[in-house]
Each structure stands twice: as C-alpha cells, then as structure tokens.
Image (spheres, rainbow, N blue to C red):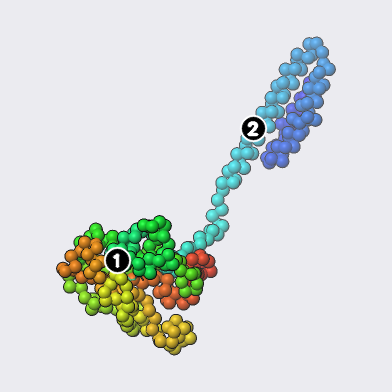
C-alpha cells in the first residue's frame, strides 16, 4: 500500500488544474465516493496491528495534501472568474440614451410665460381645489350664476370645488399684495363638460392681471397685441369683440385672423377667417372692492386664454384628447423643441 500511495502522489503532483473542468475531474478522481481516496480507506480497513498505525498516518497526510490542492485551486479559479466578470470592454458601442421631450403644452406654456415675463409679469400659482369665494364670489359671480351650476363645476362639497379658471389665483394675489400688480397665473382648470375632440373636462389656462393707477383699455390692447405679435409673428391681425364676464367691465374676446385660404382655416374659423383665442376686460370695481383694493385710485385689466387651444393651432393638433393620452408617437415629435 505504501508504494501505491507514493505512486499516486507522484502522479498527483503532475496534474495541473487550470479550468473548472480540470477541477471537477480532479474531484471525481480523488475525492468522490468512487475516488482514489475512498478506495484507499476501504483498503486500510483490512490492515491490522502495527501496520495500521503507520499507514493511518501516511493516509491522513495524503488526504490533507489532496484536499489542500483541491481547495487552493478552487479558490483561485473562483476568484479569476469574478475578475473576468468585471472586465470592461471599452471597444463596445455605448448604450444609447433616449432623450425625453417636453410636452407640447409645456412648450407653449413656457413660451407664453417667457413673453409676459419680458413685459414684467411675474408668475403666481394656486391650488387646484378652491373655495367658493376665490373661484366665484370674489369674482362677482351672482349667487345664481349658471357657471356655478353642477353642469360646469366639479363640486367637492358645498364650499369647495375644482377651480374652473385660474382667476382664483389672481384673487389671492390681490388679497395679499398692494398695486402695482402685474402677474400671470398658469395652471390646470376643470369643467364638467362632455369630452370631445374640442373640449375636455380639464385643460390649462394662463390668465393675466395688471393693476395700477390709470390703467385703461388701451393698455390692455397694447399688451395683448405685443403678445400675439411675439407668439404668432409680426403680421398677425387681431380684433376685439364685446363679451361678458362677471369679473370684467367692459369685457371682450380677442380674435386672431387666420384667413380662409385653407380648408382647415375655413373649418376652424367657421368661414369667417377669425378665431377667438382669449377673453379679457377691465377688472370690475366689485372685484377690486372684494379684494381690498381702492377702486377709486386703481384700475386694471385681466385676460385669460386656454393653452390647449393655442397649442392645437400652433402645431395643427386636431383632437384635444391627444394631449392627455401620452402616446409617444405624438410626444416624440416634440423632442428637442
Ligand atoms: N376666466 C375666464 C375664463 O375662464 C377668462 C378671462 C380672464 C376673461 C380674465 C376675462 C378676464 O374663461
């Protein structure tokens, strides 16, 4: 048996373990159930007396040599494998990063804000949920005005509703701030309307307010003309038509001239060439009074426009619902704008 072990050891020394396959072969040959080590131990059982002590020692030494070689190589192979995983191939092409895009409504809103910022208007924002006072009463809506009706307004309780316009924000500004006031209020507004290609139960507005000494309708016209010239281009034509809002007196609606050359413009303007884009007027004295502003000293104008409408016009989008579907086929077209 001694000779046998010596030979096995010699052979074992020659074995090189380089891969995990080599390691497995080594394990099967020496350390498995049917491996050499086990068979030596089986043989060892039949030895008796003095011999047993001697072989026992040799056999145990042999066993630990084999096990040591196995474990050392296993550790080495596992570690190199780990390192290989961490190797970076710098020649590989990079993973492309998909650039997002601003929503078309944000693009147009930012543009409008920019233009009014340049004219000295600062942004004010409020909450989507508003009380009756700020959305209606302070704005001179008579108690039984149809706009308060359940058909137009999403009421949350008797007192609270989803704001139907951002004029509510302007009431809050006037309550807090002394004139001169020059502010624009962008934001989402809600109306209980039947959803269709042309109207949605929520949309976005920008409303403006200017209060100072001696503000006149001429100032209102000038500011709005400058705005449309910046937004649509110098050649734009506008007109004002009388209208009614509870919070302005006189009130007007402003149209821009699209013409009737294209079928699309004919359709949009119902054959007239003119398209309404905003409501405006001189702030009603009652509103100034309600907000604690001295209406004998100060006057002002207000205006409000729907962002969806202007965005649809600018980009030829025909259905308002497309803004809220988040279909990337639409949104991707605005990447980089
Ligand atoms: N608040 C009005 C609306 O929601 C718009 C408007 C604002 C009209 C200011 C006149 C003055 O339709």
Question: Is tag 2's residue or tag 1's residue first in the polypeptide sequence?
Answer: 2
Instruction: Kindly give the residue lying farthest to the right in the view shown.
Output: 46
Between residue 13 and residue 105, name the one nearer to us: 105
Is label 2 or label 1 in front?
1
- The residue lying at 43 percent from left, 62 percent from top is 154
- Identify the residue at the far top of this view: 49
Split into 4 quadrants, where in the image is the N terminus?
top right
Q: What element carries label 2?
A: helix
Foreground pick, 137 / 262: 137
Residue 228 visible (yes or no): no
| Residue at 42%, 71% in the rendered image | 308
Residue 32 spot, x, y in % from top left? 76, 31
Tell me if 282 is positioned left or right of 327 in this view.
left
In the rendered image, residue 220, in percent from the top left (x then y), is placed at 26, 75
Q: Is residue 35 toward the left or the right of residue 316 in the image?
A: right
Residue 72 got which mark? 2
**Residue lying at 52% horizontally and 61% vertically, measured from the top left:** 96
**Furthest residue to the front?**
144
Image location (x, y in percent) of residue 68: 66, 28
Q: How crowded is mark 1: few (under 14 residues within 10 Å), some or many (20 or more)?
A: many
Relative to residue 20, is residue 45 drawn left or right? right
Report helix, strand or loop for mark 1.
helix
Q: Residue 139 carries which label?
A: 1
Ligand 1 has an atom within 8 Å of the beta carbon of the residue at disc 1: yes
State whether label 2 is within 8 Å of ligand 1: no
């Amino acid at each position: 048996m001694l000779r046998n072990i010596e030979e096995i050891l010699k052979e074992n020394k020659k074995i090189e373990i380089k891969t995990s396959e080599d390691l497995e072969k080594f394990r099967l040959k020496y350390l498995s159930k049917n491996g050499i080590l086990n068979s030596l131990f089986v043989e060892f059982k039949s030895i008796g007396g003095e011999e047993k002590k001697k072989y026992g020692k040799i056999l145990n030494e042999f066993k630990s040599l084999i096990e040591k070689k196995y474990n050392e190589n296993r550790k080495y192979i596992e570690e190199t494998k780990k390192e290989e995983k961490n190797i970076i191939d710098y020649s590989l092409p990079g993973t492309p990063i998909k650039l997002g895009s601003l929503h078309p409504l944000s693009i147009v809103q930012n543009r409008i804000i920019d233009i009014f910022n340049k004219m000295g208007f600062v942004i004010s924002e409020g909450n989507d949920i508003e009380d009756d006072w700020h959305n209606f009463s302070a704005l001179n809506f008579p108690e039984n005005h149809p706009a308060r009706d359940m058909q137009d307004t999403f009421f949350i309780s008797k007192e609270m509703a989803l704001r139907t316009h951002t004029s509510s924000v302007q009431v809050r500004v006037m309550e807090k701030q002394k004139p001169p006031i020059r502010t624009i209020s962008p934001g989402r507004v809600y109306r209980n309307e039947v959803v269709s290609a042309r109207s949605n139960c929520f949309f976005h507005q920008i409303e403006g307010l200017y209060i100072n000494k001696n503000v006149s309708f001429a100032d209102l016209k000038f500011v709005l003309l400058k705005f449309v010239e910046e937004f649509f281009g110098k050649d734009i034509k506008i007109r004002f038509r009388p209208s009614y809002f509870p919070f302005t007196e006189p009130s007007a609606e402003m149209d821009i001239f699209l013409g009737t050359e294209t079928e699309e413009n004919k359709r949009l303007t119902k054959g007239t060439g003119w398209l309404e884009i905003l409501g405006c007027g001189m702030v009603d004295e009652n509103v100034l009074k309600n907000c604690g502003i001295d209406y004998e000293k100060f006057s002002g104008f207000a205006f409000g426009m729907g962002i969806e409408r202007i965005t649809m016009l600018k980009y030829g989008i025909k259905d308002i619902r497309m803004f809220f579907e988040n279909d990337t086929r639409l949104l991707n077209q605005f990447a980089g704008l």
